[in-house]
């Protein structure tokens, strides 16, 4: 038994959970916690912005399945984590954010750097707690850990007032409760199926066996559950094609003969075609988000819908399933495997392969380069390097099991299309929230979580500039991440929408004044490479991939006006897919973003 | 018992008051008035958490009450709101996910033409997800 302060107890509890890294930024309200960290084995990775810290913890968690931990101070520090909390909540990522707070007696008095962090973050977290007694710290941390990691993972926030962090109390080391918990995510709370779930799986298996044109939809849930082996066995046993969502990339190897790649708004034509023609769709851990399901009435019109999801709130929320199992994806798929065999799906596979031959993904669409508009302003000669080509080459030369993180925008879609993912937790991208600035910090977090992996951050010039200060963090940590800045001097995705739906009225999408990214990297002591010619791609990319003396940055100058195809405009169904630049104007989308 | 007619029927210019007439017009379904009863653990912010689940969907809470429950630290919350089946379903699921909500029971409170309110059905109490056991 020892007398420890609240801050010391907090740190001891985190150590006992097996936390090795905390991403954070100090401040007055959290200073006691930072003092306790001074004596701890936990490394505090000091970032340059709290948003960067949150995305780093997020990338750390996505890449490893372990809990990502953030430590920030009160007021503006804590509120800078809000975007990161949304990002983690939307994509079901387990992170724990600990924020300092003003003295408990000052709450509500507009004290210095005081903010109602508890209130602000209520809708953005799986759970949060304002700790008002030093005795509450141990149960709060343990509860936060279980909540963040179990069931459908999500972010948890603990708000710790400064005086509570200074208060001393008895701290008894009690490992008995921790024996059944560790910081790896799979398995917590999901040990065995109930008999109801077993029956539901059997019913699902029977429905699957009566299908002639099945389609497996692998989502993030399949990755979180560690179900990729089971999914693969299921697909191969049935002879069923598999498509994946953006976040499900890697749940099923995308270069497998049965893989159709990503479906949805910018998914492959053949994956979307499969949804229009399948007679059964089995969602394993996908929530039928509006990026894949623009128009609910016309989604998989001929199919029975089966839904495996660990979150009961998701079942029936968007798509009313014909059968559903509310369980961990791995357990459910393994149970279904006991009751299935080979389906006579040869004709179906033949139909899909034929369609794929006729409508493959193309990395250089003609008819997209519109002379004049943005180029005239800058007086530049149009470059002929296209982002999709760049990413194809990068995929070719990078190790097969590289971890790829992306930012948000056109480059993200091209990366999803042209960088097939082979295994789970190798594709880290902000899907539900679509947070610009995610790519670079997520790569930093991922590299720390997986020091032996090759980590590549594919970012746009827009998102990169939102977090470019984190170059310092990468440099200090000497992490050999490869940062590929896809520079088209504009906010490409919005520009595409303005071109297609707003008569090319380009409002506020031109990124004037981009810095020389190679010089910027050099200012941080980071090696820089530049490429704007397709012929030079292999040389530059190989050099960057082989560079091991710390981080390096490739500034890839690509054509400004390029569009992502195919596209299903928001609110439209898969049958309304646009395969390449239309000759006539498209109507305004009925859906949202 | 006050009438449940909308105030905009009474006002000449059909002005909408906050909270009323907020049902999205594309939903061509008659909205029901639902009642929810919850057993909750008295933790800081429990009312705020419950209220946010409604406000984020643009649902207006028409009645709300929290009172002591059967044990120390337990409270009962009862509330009423207007919406449709889909919204009820979504709201109940979200409420069950709240860590501090132990159970949720639903009922349909429908008004007849005289403005009197009566119960028409009562669904079974439902309990929140298995993570409760670990806490």
Image (cartoon, coloured by chain):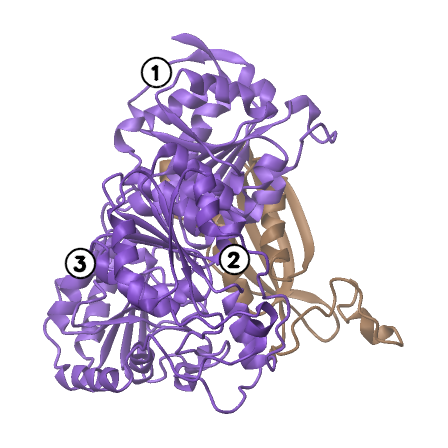
Chain colours: A purple, B brown
The residue positioned farthest toward the top in the image shown:
A2
Residue A230 numbered mark, or none: 3
Q: Residue furthest right?
A: B12
- Callout 3: SS: helix
Quadrant of image for the C terminus of chain A: bottom right
Do the residues under discs 3 and 1 have CB atoms within 8 angstroms?
no
Is residue A154 visible in the rendered structure shown here?
Answer: no
Tell me residue B3's x, y (percent): 78, 67
Characterize the local packing of mark 2: few (<14), some (14-19) or many (20 or more) Cα atoms within 10 angstroms.
Answer: many
Q: Residues within 10 Å of mark 1 (few under 14, many from 20)?
A: few
The answer for which chain carries disc 2 is A
User: Which numbered marker is on residue A173?
Assistant: 1
Residue at 44% across / 20% down in the picture?
A: A37
- Closest to the observer, A205 or A222: A222
Disc 2 target residue = A462
Looking at the image, which is closer to me, A279 or B79? A279
In three-dimensional space, the C-alpha distance between marks 3 and 1, rounded to whole angstroms, equals 39 Å
């Amino acid at each position: 038994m020892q007398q420890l302060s609240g801050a010391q107890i907090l740190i001891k509890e985190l150590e006992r959970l097996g936390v090795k890294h905390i991403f954070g930024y100090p401040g007055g309200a959290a200073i006691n916690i930072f003092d306790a960290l001074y004596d701890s084995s936990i490394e505090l990775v000091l970032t340059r912005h709290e948003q960067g810290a949150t995305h780093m913890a997020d990338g750390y968690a996505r890449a490893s399945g372990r809990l990502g931990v953030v430590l920030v101070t009160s007021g503006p520090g804590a509120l800078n984590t809000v975007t990161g909390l949304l990002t983690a909540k939307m994509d079901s990522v387990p992170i724990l954010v600990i924020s300092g707070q003003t003295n408990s007696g000052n709450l509500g008095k507009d004290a210095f750097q005081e903010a109602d962090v508890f209130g602000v973050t209520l809708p953005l977290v799986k759970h949060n707690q304002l700790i008002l007694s030093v005795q509450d710290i141990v149960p709060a941390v343990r509860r936060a850990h279980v909540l963040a990691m179990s069931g459908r993972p999500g972010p948890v926030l603990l708000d710790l007032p400064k005086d509570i962090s200074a208060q001393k109390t008895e701290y008894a080391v009690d490992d008995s409760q921790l024996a059944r918990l560790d910081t790896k995510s799979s398995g917590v709370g999901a040990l065995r199926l109930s008999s109801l779930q077993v029956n539901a799986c059997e019913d699902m298996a029977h429905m699957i066996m009566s299908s002639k044109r099945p389609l497996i939809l692998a989502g993030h849930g399949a990755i979180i559950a560690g179900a990729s082996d089971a999914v693969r066995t299921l697909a191969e046993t049935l002879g069923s094609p598999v498509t994946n969502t953006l976040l499900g990339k890697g749940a099923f190897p995308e270069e497998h003969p049965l893989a159709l790649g990503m479906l949805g708004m910018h998914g492959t034509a053949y994956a979307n075609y499969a949804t229009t023609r399948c007679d059964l769709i089995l969602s394993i851990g996908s929530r039928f988000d509006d990026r894949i399901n623009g128009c609910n009435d016309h989604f998989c019109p001929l199919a029975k819908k089966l839904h495996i999801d660990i979150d009961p709130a998701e079942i029936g929320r968007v798509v009313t399933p014909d059968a559903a199992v509310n369980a961990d994806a791995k357990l459910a798929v393994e149970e279904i495997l006991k009751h299935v065999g080979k389906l006579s799906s040869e004709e179906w596979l033949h139909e899909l392969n034929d369609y794929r031959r006729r409508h493959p993904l193309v990395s250089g669409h003609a008819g997209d380069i519109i002379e004049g508009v943005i180029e005239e302003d800058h007086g530049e000669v149009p470059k002929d390097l296209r982002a999709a080509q760049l990413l194809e080459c990068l995929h070719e030369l990078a190790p097969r099991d590289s971890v790829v993180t992306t930012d948000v925008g056109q480059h993200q879609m091209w990366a999803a299309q042209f960088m097939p993912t082979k295994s789970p937790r190798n594709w880290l991208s902000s899907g539900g929230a679509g947070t610009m600035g995610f790519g670079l910090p997520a790569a930093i977090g991922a590299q720390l979580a997986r020091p032996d992996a090759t980590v590549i951050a594919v970012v746009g010039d827009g998102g990169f500039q939102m977090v470019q200060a984190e170059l310092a963090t990468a440099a200090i940590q000497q992490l050999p991440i490869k940062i590929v800045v896809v520079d088209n001097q504009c906010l490409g995705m919005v520009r595409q929408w303005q071109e297609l739906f707003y008569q090319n009225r380009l409002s506020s999408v031109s990124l004037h004044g981009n810095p020389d990214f190679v010089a910027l990297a050099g200012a941080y002591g980071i090696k820089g490479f530049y490429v704007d010619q397709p012929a030079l791609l292999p040389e530059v990319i190989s050099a960057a991939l082989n560079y091991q003396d710390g981080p390096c940055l490739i500034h890839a100058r690509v054509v400004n006006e390029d569009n992502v195809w195919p596209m299903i405009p928001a609110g439209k169904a898969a049958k309304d897919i646009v395969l390449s630049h239309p000759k006539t104007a498209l109507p305004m989308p009925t859906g949202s973003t | 018992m006050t009438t449940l007619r909308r105030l905009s029927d009474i006002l000449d210019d059909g002005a909408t008051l906050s909270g009323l007439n907020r049902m999205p017009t594309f939903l061509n379904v008659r909205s029901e008035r639902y009642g929810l009863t919850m057993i909750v653990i008295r933790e800081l912010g429990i009312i705020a958490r419950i209220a946010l689940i409604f406000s984020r969907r643009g649902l207006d809470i028409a009645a709300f009450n929290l009172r002591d429950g059967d044990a120390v630290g337990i409270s009962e919350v009862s509330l009423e709101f207007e919406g449709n089946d889909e919204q009820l379903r979504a709201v109940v699921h979200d409420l069950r996910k709240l860590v501090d909500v132990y159970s949720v029971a639903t009922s349909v409170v429908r008004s007849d033409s005289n403005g009197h309110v009566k119960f028409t059905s009562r669904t079974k109490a439902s309990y929140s997800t298995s993570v409760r056991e670990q806490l």
